[in-house]
Image (cartoon, helix red, strand yellow):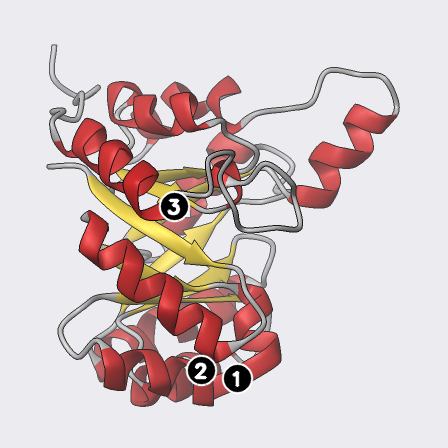
Amino acid sequence: MKPIVQISLDLTDIDEALETAALALRAGVDWLEAGTPLILAEGLHGVRKLREAFPNIPIVADLKTMDGGYLEAEMMAKAGATHVVVMARAHAETIKCVVQAGKDFGVKVMGDNMVYPDMVAGAKFLEDLGCDYVIHHIGYDERRGIAASGKRMPSPLDQLREVVAAVSVPVQAVGGLSLEQAIQCPQYGAPLVVLGAPLTIDANSFKTASGDLEGSLRLICEAIHSQETINPHKP
C-alpha cells in the first residue's frame, strides 16, 4: 500500500479548520481528519462544512466512540465522513455496531487501541471484529503524565512493528511522534501517516518554527509519498 498522509484538524474553529485543510491539500495531504476537538466544538456541522468545501476528499471523523456505536457512525456518515473511529476499550458489541453501520452507510471503520491493556492484542481484537484499519495510539495525557513523573515518555513506535505484524489491515501510528518519526512510519509497515501536533512548536499552537506551514507540509508529504510501505508479512 502506498503511504497516505492525513492531517489532524485538532482545532476548535471551523473557519480555521477549513483554511488549514485547504492549505494542507495544496501541499499534498491526502485525507482530512475532523479531530476530536473540532467535533466537540462544531459537531456534525463541522463535518458537513468540510464535506461541502472538499467534496472528493476522504474525511476521518475522530469520534473515539465508546457507546451508541451505530447511531454515532450513521450520523457522521450522513454528515459526509468517509471514516469513523471506535475504541478498542469499547464493548465488543459497540465495535460490531460501528462495523455494521460502516457497511450500511459506506464508511470505513478505524479501530483505536489506546489504553488497551495489551496493545498488540487490542489491534488484533479490532481486526477480528471487522475494523478496516487499526490506529496504534499512545494518548496525549498518558504521554505527558508519564514524562512529568520523570520516566521515559512512551511512543507508538515502541510496539509498532509488533502491531503491524499481528494484523493484516493497514495501521496508523499516533501519539507524540516527531516529524522525523512520522515520516519513518511506512518503514515500520504503517502506511497511514498522521500529521498534526508533530508540526507544532507548542502543544497548543498549530504553527511550525518557521511559520511556513504549507511549505513544511509539502516537503513532508513528498518525503512520505516517495516511500514504499514495508510489508512485514512478506519474507
Camera-side mark, 2 or 3: 3
Residue 176 locus on image (x, y percent): 57, 33
Residue at 46% x, 43% y is 211
Q: Where is residue 170, by image quadrant? A: top left
Horizontal arrangement in the rendering, residue 150 relative to residue 58 (left or right): right
Residue at numbered disc 2: 46
In this view, the residue in front, 166 or 15, is 15
Residue at 36% x, 40% y is 172
Specify the amino acid type for callout 3.
Leu
The local secondary structure at tag 3 comes to helix
Residue at numbered disc 3: 213
Residue at numbered disc 1: 43
Sort mark 2 into few (<14), some (14-19) or many (20+) by Cα contacts within 10 Å: many
CA–CA distance in space, label 3 to label 1? 26 Å
Q: Quadrant of the C terminus?
A: top left
The local secondary structure at tag 2 comes to helix
CB contact under 8 Å: marks 3 and 1: no
CA–CA distance in space, label 1 to label 2? 6 Å
Sort mark 3 into few (<14), some (14-19) or many (20+) by Cα contacts within 10 Å: some
Q: Earlier in the sequence, mark 2 or mark 3?
A: 2
Horizontal arrangement in the rendering, residue 194 relative to residue 158 (left or right): left
Horizontal arrangement in the rendering, residue 114 relative to residue 227 (left or right): right
In this view, the residue in front, 125 or 3, is 3
The local secondary structure at tag 1 comes to helix
Residue at 29% x, 31% y is 190
Q: Earlier in the sequence, mark 3 or mark 1?
A: 1
